[in-house]
Image (cartoon, grey):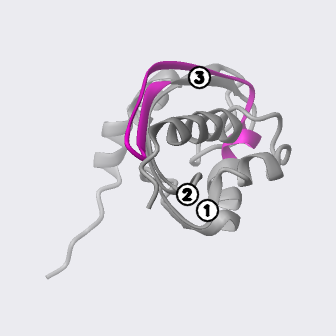
Amino acid sequence: KSQDAATAQKVAKAALHDDWIGSGAGAGTRQWRSHWHSNLTFYGPGGIGRAHGTEQYRQHVVEPFRAAFDDRSLDTKIFGCEGNYCGAFGELSGRHVRPWLGLEASGKILAIRFAIQWRVVDGLVQEGWALFDIPAVFKQLDLDFFAMAAAARPQIHS
């Protein structure tokens, strides 16, 4: 498999921008899809989950995020590649205009810290992993993520 860091960097940077910033909930479908292998696996954080294939990724990851946030922007703090693996750390921001992860629209500009990694094979992203600082999003909405999680603790039966 290809270990070309220059190609991996180009593809991963384009995927980061086109997937998360894009230009509207359904816009740019062909654009972002061109970066992903048809047999992709995307591992998202709790509340987003895992997606197999471009259709699940579009429907369950990209579109809900784009629909929930207008005026999206990206501030990449760190970006690097080693061989065909790339990673980025930074902040996505946008005006919260529709529900996301069960959080009603607040109208506030929210900043979401992220870490995303990609494995690029033959010029396409085959796998992606993402972490979002969800507790910090809750805090920006004056909600205590950890208190809410503790109050909703599931009952374990033996």
Which residue is identified by label 3?
110
Question: Magenta span has 82?
Answer: yes
Sequence-first disc among 3 and 1: 1
Mark 2 crowdedness (10 Å alpha carbons): few <14, some 14-19, many ≥20: some
Instruction: State left or right for residue 73 relative to residue 24.
Output: left
Q: Quadrant of the C terminus?
A: bottom left
| Residue with the most extreme bottom position | 158
| Position of the N terminus by quadrant | bottom left
Question: Could you say whether the residue bearing mark 2 is in a helix, strand or loop?
Answer: loop
Q: Is residue 132 left or right of residue 31?
A: left
Q: Amino acid at mark 3?
A: Leu
Which mark sits nearer the N-terminus, 3 or 2?
3
Question: Residue 72 lies in what quarter of the image?
Answer: top right
What crowding class fits label 1: few (fewer than 14 Cα within 10 Å), some (14-19), or many (20 or more)? some
Q: Amino acid at mark 2?
A: Asp
Question: Distance of mark 3 from mark 1, alpha carbons?
Answer: 30 Å
**Where is mark 1, residue-wise?**
37
Type of amino acid at the residue the image marks with label 1: His
- Residue extent of the magenta highlight: 64-90
Q: Nearer the viewer, residue 69 or 33?
A: 33
Using the image as rendered, state which of residue 106 and residue 122 is in the foreground.
122
Secondary element at image label 1: strand
Residue with the mark numbered 2: 122
- Inter-mark Cα distance, 1 to 2: 9 Å
